[in-house]
Image: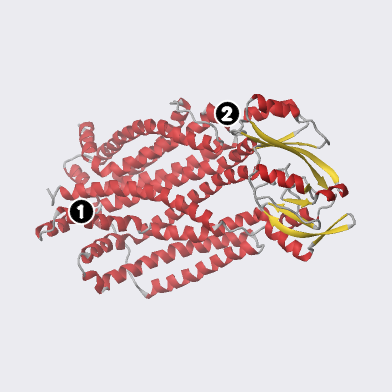
C-alpha cells in the first residue's frame, strides 16, 4: 500500500520537482562527463603527464558532493515543509512516523532512479562537449564517437549514492522525531528577516563600505607595490564581509524605498512592487547568499576563460610555425627541409644567426623585479642576444610585419609586451649602447610576437637588433632555421623531426600548444566544473523559493481576473516580476567581477613577471562579455522553466 501511495504521490509532485529534477540531472551529467575524462584513453593520449588531473577532478567532485548534498537536503526539507499537513493527516489516520518517513523516502528514491537514468544518458552525450573543449585546446581534430565507461558510471553512482543517502537519512530522522502537531503547523514556524531600515542596519552598511574601501585599497596597492600575501588574504576577507553586509543592507534600503515611495502608485507598478517586496523581504539573507554564490561562479568562469586564452596567446607568441636551434655554426638543416617538402608543408624558410657580446645588461633589466621578488633566476639564458638588421627585416617579412630600417648609429629592441615598461625606463637612463669602440642610440622598442617567450628563441624576453656591420664586433651564439608551413604540424610530425637530429632543439606551435594546454587544463576543467555546479545550485534555490510562493499568489491572480485584466496582460506582468526576482541578485555579482577581476589578474601577473599588467580594455571587455553570456544563458534557462511552472500553477485556479 505504501509503495502504491509513494508512486502516486511522486507522479502528483512532478510539477513541484521539475526544477529539482533538472538540477539533479545536470549534476549526474557533469559528474559522469568529468569522471569519463579520468578514464578516457583518447584524452589520456592527448594530455601529457595527466596524473595530476584525475586527482583534481576527484577533489572537485568531492566538493560537488558536499554542495549537492546541502542542496538536496535543503530541497527535501523544503518539500517536507510544503507537505507537512499531508503527513500530519497520515499520522492522524494511524500511520506511524517510521512508515510516513519510509513513504517519503520511497517517493524520493523513485525520482532519484529517473534522475540517474536520464543523467547518465545526458552525461554520456555531454562528455562529447567536454572532450571537444579539451581537444580544441590542443588544436586536434575532433571525432564524434559515443563512449561508455563503466568505471566512470560506477564512480558517478557512488557519488550520487552519497548525496541521496545522506539526505534520505536526515529527512527520515527528522520525520521520525516530529509530532502530528509539529507537522500540521510546520509552515507557520518559518520566520523571515525583520527590522528593515533600522539605525543598526545603517551603521552596519557604513562599516561594510569602510571595510570594502580598505580591501580594495590593499588589492590596488598590491598591483603597484610588493606587499605580503597575508595582506591580500586579509583584503579578501574584508571584501567578502563588505559584499555580504553591504548588499544585505542595500536590498533592505531598496525595499524600504519600495514600501514608502509614491512612484509605485503609477499604472501597474503597485502590484509588481508589492509582489517583489512580499517575496524578497522575508528572504533577504537567502537572496544575498545567492549573490555571493553568483560572484564566486562568475570568478570561476572568468579565470577559466583567462587560462584558456593564455594557451592561444603563448602559441601566437611563437610566431613561426617551427624553428630549429643549434649551437654549432653553419648547421646543416637540409634534412628538416626535406622532411617538410615530402609532407608538402613547406611554404618558406629562413636561416640566420644570433650573436652575443657576453654581457647581460638588457636581460638583467627584464629579470630584475623577478629576482628581487623570488631571489632566484628563472631562466637558463644569461646573455644579451643580438640579430643583424637584414635578418630582422627578412623575418618580419615572413611574419607579414612592417619593415623597419636602421641608421648606421641606431639599434632596436624587440621584446615581449611585459618587458616594454622596464626597458623604456632603462634606455631613458642609458640611451647609448656601446659595441666595440662605437656607440649606438635607441631608435624604438617593438613588442610584436617574435618567438621570445620560450627557453630557446630570439632572445628570451628581449632581442637587440643592430646594423649589419656591427655583427663583426659580436660573437656567434646560435644558428637558427625559422619555417612557415601550410598547416599546423602535428605533435607526431614534430617528434619525427626530433629523431632526425637530436642535436637541434625544436620550438614549434604544436609543441608549445601541447605544453601550455596541459598546464591550463588543470585550471580550466575544475573551474568550469565547479562554476556550472554552483550556478545550477543557486538557480535551483531561486526557482524553488519563487515557486513556493506561486500558490499564495492565486488570490492576487483571481482579483486581477475579476477586475478585468486579460491573461496576456497578466503574463506580461508576471514575466517582469519573475525577471526582477531572478536577475536582481546577479547585478551586484556582475559589478563585483567587472571591478575586481581585472585587478586580481593584474596582481597575479605581477607576481609572475614582476610587472604591472592590467587586462587590456578590449580583451577585458571581451572576456567579461563571454563570461556574462555563459552565466545569463544558464539563468535564462532556469528562469524560463520557472516562469512556465509558475504560470501553470496559477492557471489551475484563476485563468482556466
Q: Which residue bears the numbered disc 1?
A: 571
Residue visible at 32% across and 40% down? 21
Lateral position of residue 40 relative to residue 3, left or right: right
Lateral position of residue 376 relative to residue 129, left or right: right
Describe the colour scheme in one phrase. Answer: secondary structure
One can see residue 179 in this view: no
Q: Provide residue 365's location: percent of width, then percent of height.
A: 76, 57
One can see residue 121 in this view: yes
Name, please, the residue furthest toward the right: 437
Instruction: Label 2: state its secondary structure.
Output: helix
Upstream in the sequence, badge 1 or badge 2?
2
Lateral position of residue 117 relative to residue 354, left or right: left
Q: Which residue bears the numbered disc 2?
A: 45
How many marks are shown on the rendered structure?
A: 2
Towards the viewer: 97 or 213: 213
Lateral position of residue 260 relative to residue 653, left or right: right
Amino acid at each position: 500500500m505504501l509503495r502504491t501511495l509513494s508512486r502516486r504521490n511522486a507522479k502528483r509532485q512532478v510539477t513541484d520537482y521539475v526544477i529539482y529534477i533538472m538540477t539533479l540531472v545536470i549534476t549526474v551529467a557533469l559528474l559522469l562527463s568529468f569522471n569519463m575524462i579520468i578514464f578516457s584513453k583518447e584524452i589520456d593520449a592527448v594530455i601529457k603527464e595527466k596524473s595530476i588531473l584525475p586527482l583534481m577532478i576527484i577533489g572537485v567532485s568531492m566538493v560537488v558532493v558536499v554542495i549537492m548534498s546541502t542542496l538536496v537536503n535543503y530541497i527535501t526539507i523544503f518539500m517536507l515543509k510544503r507537505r507537512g499537513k499531508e503527513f500530519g493527516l497520515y499520522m492522524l489516520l494511524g500511520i506511524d512516523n517510521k512508515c510516513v518517513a519510509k513513504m517519503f523516502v520511497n517517493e524520493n528514491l523513485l525520482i532519484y532512479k529517473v534522475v540517474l537514468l536520464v543523467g547518465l544518458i545526458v552525461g554520456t552525450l555531454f562528455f562529447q562537449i567536454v572532450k571537444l573543449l579539451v581537444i580544441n585546446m590542443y588544436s586536434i581534430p575532433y571525432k564524434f564517437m559515443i563512449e561508455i565507461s563503466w568505471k566512470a558510471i560506477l564512480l558517478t553512482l557512488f557519488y550520487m549514492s552519497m548525496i541521496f543517502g545522506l539526505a534520505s537519512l536526515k529527512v527520515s530522522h527528522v520525520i521520525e522525531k516530529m509530532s502530528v502537531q509539529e507537522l500540521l503547523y510546520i509552515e507557520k514556524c518559518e520566520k523571515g528577516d525583520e527590522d528593515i531600515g533600522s539605525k543598526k542596519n545603517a551603521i552596519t552598511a557604513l562599516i561594510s563600505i569602510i571595510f570594502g574601501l580598505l580591501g580594495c585599497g590593499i588589492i590596488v596597492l598590491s598591483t603597484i607595490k610588493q606587499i605580503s600575501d597575508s595582506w591580500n588574504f586579509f583584503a579578501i576577507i574584508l571584501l567578502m564581509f563588505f559584499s555580504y553586509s553591504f548588499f544585505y543592507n542595500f536590498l533592505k534600503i531598496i525595499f524600504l524605498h519600495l514600501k514608502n515611495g509614491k512612484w509605485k502608485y503609477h499604472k501597474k507598478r503597485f502590484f509588481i512592487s508589492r509582489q517583489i517586496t512580499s517575496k524578497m523581504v522575508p528572504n533577504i539573507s537567502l537572496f544575498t547568499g545567492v549573490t555571493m554564490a553568483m560572484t564566486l561562479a562568475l570568478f570561476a568562469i572568468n579565470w577559466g576563460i583567462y587560462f584558456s586564452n593564455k594557451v592561444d596567446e603563448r602559441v601566437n607568441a611563437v610566431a613561426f610555425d617551427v624553428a630549429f636551434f643549434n649551437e654549432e655554426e653553419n648547421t646543416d638543416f637540409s634534412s628538416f627541409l626535406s622532411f617538410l617538402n615530402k609532407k608538402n608543408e613547406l611554404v618558406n624558410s629562413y636561416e640566420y644567426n644570433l650573436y652575443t657580446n657576453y654581457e647581460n645588461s638588457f636581460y638583467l633589466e627584464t629579470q630584475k623585479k623577478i629576482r628581487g621578488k623570488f631571489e632566484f633566476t628563472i631562466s637558463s639564458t644569461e646573455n644579451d642576444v643580438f640579430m643583424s638588421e637584414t635578418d630582422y627585416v627578412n623575418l618580419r617579412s615572413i611574419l607579414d610585419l612592417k619593415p623597419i630600417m636602421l641608421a648606421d648609429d641606431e639599434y632596436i629592441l624587440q621584446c615581449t609586451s611585459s618587458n616594454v615598461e622596464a626597458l623604456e625606463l632603462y634606455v631613458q637612463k642609458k640611451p647609448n649602447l656601446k659595441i666595440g669602440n662605437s656607440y649606438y642610440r635607441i631608435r624604438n622598442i617593438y613588442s610584436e610576437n617574435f618567438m621570445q617567450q620560450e627557453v630557446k628563441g630570439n632572445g628570451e624576453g628581449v632581442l637587440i637588433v643592430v646594423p649589419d656591420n656591427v655583427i663583426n664586433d659580436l660573437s656567434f651564439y646560435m644558428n637558427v632555421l625559422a619555417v612557415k608551413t601550410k598547416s599546423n604540424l602535428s605533435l607526431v610530425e614534430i617528434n619525427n623531426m626530433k629523431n632526425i637530429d637530436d642535436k637541434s632543439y625544436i620550438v614549434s606551435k604544436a609543441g608549445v600548444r601541447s605544453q601550455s594546454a596541459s598546464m591550463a587544463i588543470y585550471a580550466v576543467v575544475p573551474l568550469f566544473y565547479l562554476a556550472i555546479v554552483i550556478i545550477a545550485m543557486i538557480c535551483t534555490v531561486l526557482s524553488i523559493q519563487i515557486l513556493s510562493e506561486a500558490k499564495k499568489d492565486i488570490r492576487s491572480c483571481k482579483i486581477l481576473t475579476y477586475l478585468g485584466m486579460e491573461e496576456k496582460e497578466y503574463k506580461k506582468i508576471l514575466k517582469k516580476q519573475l525577471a526582477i526576482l531572478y536577475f536582481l541578485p546577479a547585478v551586484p555579482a556582475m559589478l563585483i567581477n567587472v571591478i575586481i577581476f581585472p585587478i586580481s589578474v593584474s596582481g597575479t601577473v605581477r607576481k609572475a613577471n614582476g610587472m604591472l599588467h592590467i587586462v587590456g580594455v578590449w580583451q577585458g571587455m571581451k572576456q567579461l562579455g563571454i563570461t556574462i553570456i555563459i552565466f545569463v544563458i544558464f539563468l535564462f534557462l532556469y528562469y524560463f522553466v520557472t516562469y512556465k511552472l509558475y504560470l501553470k500553477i496559477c492557471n489551475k485556479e484563476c485563468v482556466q
